[in-house]
Amino acid sequence: MTTFQRRVIPLNQVMRESLPNGGWVEYEDFPTPIEVTGPLLYSLFQEHWQEVGVGHVVDGSVLELEFNQPPKILRLYDGYLTVVTEGWHLHLCLEENLGGPSCQTPIELRQKRLVSRGALYRRFNPRGQARSWGIQFWNGAGERMMNLFLPNPFVGEHEDLLPENKPNLEKLKLYETIRKIYVLGEQEIPYTENPLKRAFISVCRSSRCNPSQNWQPIYEALQKSVEKAELNIDAINSGCLEVCKMGPIVFYSGDRTWYTRVTPELAEQIVQEHLVEGKTLTSHVYPRAVVQES
Ligand code: FES
């Protein structure tokens, strides 16, 4: 197991992209392994959700979404970070997307989906004045993925534009802190472990794998057993866990194990035997053949 490195090694890569209006965008790249993007995105979405926006910008179109509340779900599953709010959700591929228990995602597609470049940016007008601040991600094919919009000192409450000579420069604090931690490596990452890599055990609540939708007692059994065993993991329920048959399905993220036909009793057994004692319950593991061969 690799130790979590709290100090980012800077890439020292600054690029300037000219804009047709005479302005430009300055990009300062940061490394994009999950050890860097995990804490960065967790801190922005969990701790600074009031200050950041999410969207996509290309010539001719801007999509911009804001948080009204903290995210309901912030979870990494099979490489994808999922963030769910009351009104919208996003997925961003931060680790290889293997494709569920059968590992079906082709290698080239895994590489294409993955965030492969990330940069903090400042957008300048033709007079050389910075006008917007944010983060841009690119995928493995070099395509622009998502933008995160950081606080803008020229914008007041309710998108009100402040007078040109009265920017609220306090609002640049988040940009400056991110830059020191994730671009320049001058400050440590403010976590002792990667918050997006915290292990969890989850039951699928979708009806495709479990038409009777009797996941609730299993969820409760997982929660009680995890609490009783004093384990430092989350017991949750979630959407599809990529088995889609023989439900209820339970997934343990610590070693990527799927269980089928789970009952509340079996859920307790999984926690005790697998998570506490390290013994996989082979008769319910999916896919069974892989386990039997190993
Ligand atoms: S719907 Fe439950 S695993 Fe896919």
Image: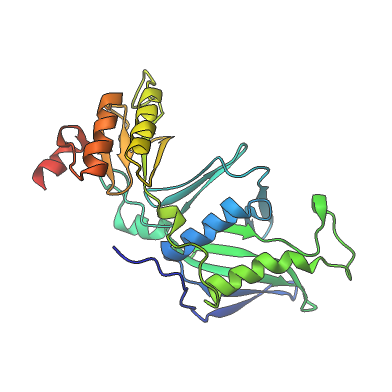
In this view of the protein, which residue sits in the foreground, 69 or 133? Answer: 69
Residue occupying the point 66% across, 48% down: 65
Residue occupying the point 26% across, 43% down: 275
- Does 206 sit above or below residue 43? above
Residue 110, position as x, y percentages in the image: 35, 56
Residue 71 visible in the snapshot: yes
Residue 278, position as x, y percentages in the image: 20, 45
- Does 175 sit above or below residue 113? below
Q: What is the total number of numbered labels drawn onto the structure image? A: 0
Residue 202, position as x, y percentages in the image: 37, 37
In this view of the protein, which residue sits in the foreground, 168 or 147? Answer: 168
Which residue is the extreme one toward the top?
A: 212
Which residue is the extreme one toward the bottom?
A: 12
In this view of the protein, which residue sits in the foreground, 100 or 258? Answer: 258
For the N terminus, which image quadrant? bottom left
Residue occupying the point 65% across, 55% down: 52
- Does 77 sit above or below residue 145? above
Q: Is residue 96 left or right of residue 180?
A: left
Residue occupying the point 36% across, 52% down: 97
Residue 241 visible in the snapshot: no
In this view of the protein, which residue sits in the foreground, 45 or 47? Answer: 47
Residue 209, position as x, y percentages in the image: 33, 27
> Please, which colouring scheme is shown?
rainbow
